[in-house]
Amino acid sequence: MARSRLQEVLEAHAAPLCLGQPEPGGKVRCVACGHRCLIPEGRAGVCKVRFNRGGKLLGPWGYVAGVQDDPIEKKPFYHALPGTRALSFGMLGCDLHCGYCQNWVTSQALRDEVAGAPVRETTPAALVALARKAGALTVTSTYNEPLITTEWGVAVFQEARAHGLRTAFVSNGNNTDEAIAHLKPWCDFYKVDLKGFDDANYRKLGGTLQAILDGIERVYRAGMWLEVLTLVVPGFNDSEQQLGGIAGFLAEISPDIPWHVTAFHPDYKFNDRDPTPPRSLLLAAEIGKGAGLRYVYAGNLPGKVSTHENTYCPHCEALLIERRGFALRRYLLRDGACPQCQAPIPGRWHDAGTLSALRLAEHATVRTMGTWL
């Protein structure tokens, strides 16, 4: 879809937003992400989807550009209702421009002529009905950067909570105090993609390292369940210095934050390098453990990363959850504790009724749901 036509479509699917503040001269200060854009009349912010019309901040509402029914491990969340389904929904746009983005078709739709995905009108009630029909226990705002669509995400989350579902945010972490305050009452699980530990590299992606580190601490302090992912990209962030910096930073906040180190595959503008080899993930896992992190997981290479797909008790080393890829093979936790030494394991775990209903053999299926809307 041509940029001008896409812009028209998105402006037709816009509504007044609350994460903005009026400024002199008819400008609006957007506070949804760390850029805190000062937007003049008739212009858009860095994300290109939040814009000023008549001194009011407008932005995405009433549509999706992607809907999928996933294992919650695909998000990835390993300490949040493992073995259950998550209905993922996303819109268009992002406040960063990562050259290796795995979701670039949606995230870069307003920056790149070859990006873009069909827009489907929907409502929070329709998305929640779809989640319930699919048997999902969680609805997840993802695919593009959900911070720039926080108000829409909260509307969906409010509907989800009303029907007993959990809610999740899959974000780059470039958040603000205002966005987290708006999100906190309605969000259960929050995953941050920490893309490295080098500010110069972060600036190439359109952000700053310190803003993301502050965002991670902000989420943790807010009390949402936090997990952090680093896509290990050869030649970009796979040095021992960067991986050690990430692991040390997370361990200082809490050694109980799960850290996922996952494999890159050539995509978008990063087609000039090889996929991440298993040895890089194994090294990252060793670095994480050495820094004091109790739960470090290696992903995207099922069966090739030793035991780093599984969850073990950090006290007695008993196997608690066995995984292969997105598939849950065994779940041995009892009431959120190790069955061998009774140590509590941090996370958001199942009650007995939910656990007895799990059908692990069917769990790893991924289903595109767009035609169900």
Image (cartoon, grey):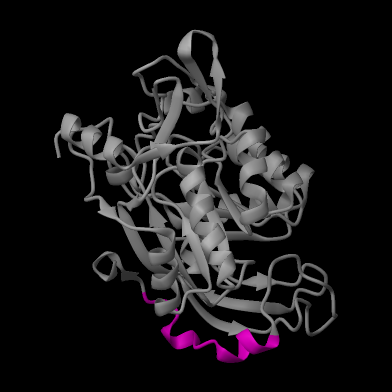
Q: Which residues are drawn in magenta? A: 352-365
Q: For the point 19% across and 31% down, which residue is it? A: 3
- Above or below — where is 353 with respect to 300? below
Q: Tell me: 96 left or right of 193.
A: left
- Using the image as rendered, state which of residue 282 and residue 260 is in the foreground: 260
- Using the image as rendered, state which of residue 177 and residue 182 is in the foreground: 182
Q: For the point 45% across and 20% down, which residue is it? A: 55
Q: For the point 57% across and 52% down, which residue is it? A: 191
* Figure quadrant of residue 352: bottom right
- Above or below — where is 231 with respect to 69? above
Q: Tell me: 226 left or right of 32.
A: right
Q: Tell me: 181 left or right of 10.
A: right
The residue most toward the front is: 54
Chief secondary structure of the magenta portion: helix
* Figure quadrant of residue 274: top left
* Figure quadrant of residue 113: top left
Question: Where residue 341 sits: x, y (%)?
Answer: 85, 80
Question: Where residue 186 sits: x, y (%)?
Answer: 62, 55
**Residue 27 within the magenta-colored segment of the rendering:** no
Question: Where residue 356 sits: x, y (%)?
Answer: 61, 91
Q: Quadrant of the N terminus?
A: top left
Residue 182 appears in the rendering: yes
- Using the image as rendered, state which of residue 295 and residue 121 is in the foreground: 121
- Using the image as rendered, state which of residue 194 and residue 123 is in the foreground: 123
**Residue 364 within the magenta-colored segment of the rendering:** yes
